[in-house]
Image (tube, rainbow, N blue to C red):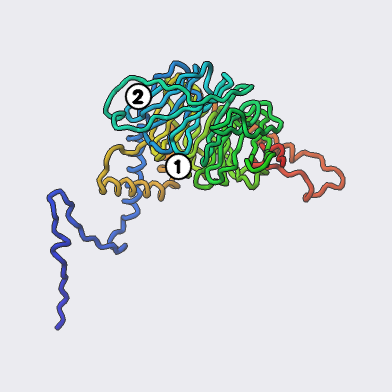
Amino acid sequence: MKVKVLSRSEEQFTRERCQDVQKVHRNLDPALHPLEKAKEYQRALNAVKLDKVFAKPFMGALGSHADGVSAMARSPTRLNCVVSASMDGDVRLWDVPYKRTLCRFTGHSRAVRGVAISADGDTMLSCGDDCTVRLWQLPAPEIKELVVEGGEEEHEAVATFQGKNAFRAVDHKWKGRVFATAGAQVDVWEHSRSDPISTFTWGADSVYSVRFNPAEPEVFATTGSDRSICLYDLRMSTPLRKVIMQTKTNSLAWNPREPLNFTAANENGSCYSYDMRNLSTASLVHKDHVSAVMDIDYSPTGREFVTGSYDRTVRIFPFDGIKSREVYHTKRMQRVFCVRFSGDGSYVLSGSDDANIRLWKAQASQQLGVQVKREKRRAEYNAALVERHQHLPEIRRIHKHRHVPRPIHNAIKLRATMVAAEKRKEENRQRFKKKSKGVTKKNEDKKKSERRNKIIAELE
């Protein structure tokens, strides 16, 4: 006679500490759990509600500037440091966790429009309306910075580069000691030379922003006053390509994980993602802002980007999503001129016209501090539940709801009415349009998609 016996090792089922959780044996046969789907749905509903309960994204403000914050740059080698510049010529290096100024960089007599930090994190560049670009030496990180509350140190510029016109933006090359400035023209400089080593012009009266490609060090892109986006290569004497849009582009950012793609922040409140190999059409249009988008920056993961707008909101978009997943605003925050992700992608910094730098969580309901494994697994499980059931009506309604101020809410409704009227007008025009002789369905004018409609011309 055969006797089946359950054999279990005592070591695997005995708690080592009294805080350990007892192991529970569970039969996963679906026939024994007829209400499993209902229980999972209820858990997903509870998870998405708890996300709203614990959504407190605002972390604090850095408020030592006396005028509006015009530019920011994060250090590629130090997670706790960020450089900001204001309209009164003040440039500061911040210790973000302690919300204090480590040092000030004095020298600019007028508004500072752009700042950039080199890839090694040792030097910093600033440019402004006083027609100068200044090179600064960043102080080395020391332990005393974290424990001693000292006064604000003032640093003098290591080198000054004089230009003929005001500068609007600056960016440092990812490799080498070369940087580019944007103003009346695009100038490329070297640290050891007082004059530009090369100059590019292509139709624009003023160039607003410049960004180097993170993977191809010789390639960079600019945006101009003629509503253009231009691509340049330092190995060539002429620009590569140029695309002209219906409205002006204020800034752009390269995707660090997909360096062939970049996203442009436009004056019409939308962001347009492009592939640099094909500028004839935008790969995606990101819409949610109701006013001009002033600045944009990608997360180090490349999976999302943050935008700051003239409508006094900060939004976070998925890189492949049309609508934003988060919107941040406060009663006191004014027009947002610059935004940056932190080096680890966990936080967002925004600089606004009210002379404040605000620190936000990238995930609004994320728990801060050290988490044990059980808490991490629980958070991952809740996120997976919400993602699995997000198509269901009740969960979708709660998950997508975002409170916005009344002026923005009214502007969203007005814009929806205008878009519907424009669509109806186009449909009526196509319906009652008189067909000329010889016109067939093949060569008849077709309605352009929104990804192509905003592009006027592509030049090479």
Where's residue 111, x and y in %?
Answer: 53, 19
Determine whether, in the image, residue 435 is placed left or right of residue 391. Answer: right
What number is the disc on residue 365? none
The residue that disc 1 covers is 300
Q: Earlier in the sequence, mark 1 or mark 2?
A: 2
Q: Secondary structure at mark 2?
A: strand
Q: Which image quarter holds the N terminus?
A: bottom left
Res. 137 visible in picture:
yes
Residue 458 or 310: which is nearer the viewer? 458
Of 460 and 280, nearer the camera is: 460
Q: Dot 2, crowdedness within 10 Å: few (<14), some or many (≥20)?
A: some
Q: Residue at x 31, y 28 (%)?
A: 145
In the rendered structure, which amino acid carries the disc numbered 1? Pro
Residue at left offset 38%, top offset 34%: 361
Give residue 226's position: percent from left, percent from top: 68, 29
Mark 1 touches mark 2? (CB < 8 Å): no
Identified by mark 2, the residue type is: Arg
Q: Residue at x 50, y 31 (%)?
A: 116
Whether residue 409 is visible to the viewer of this picture, yes or no, is no
Mark 1 neighbour class, 10 Å CA radius: few under 14, some 14 to 19, many 20 or more: some
- In the rendered image, residue 408, in percent from the top left (x then y), is placed at 51, 26
**Alpha-carbon distance for marks 1 and 2?**
25 Å
Between 230 and 280, the residue placed more toward the observer is 230
Q: Is residue 23 left or right of residue 35?
A: left
Which numbered dot is residue 100? 2
Q: Residue pushed farthest bottom?
A: 1
Disc 1 versus disc 2: nearer the observer:
2
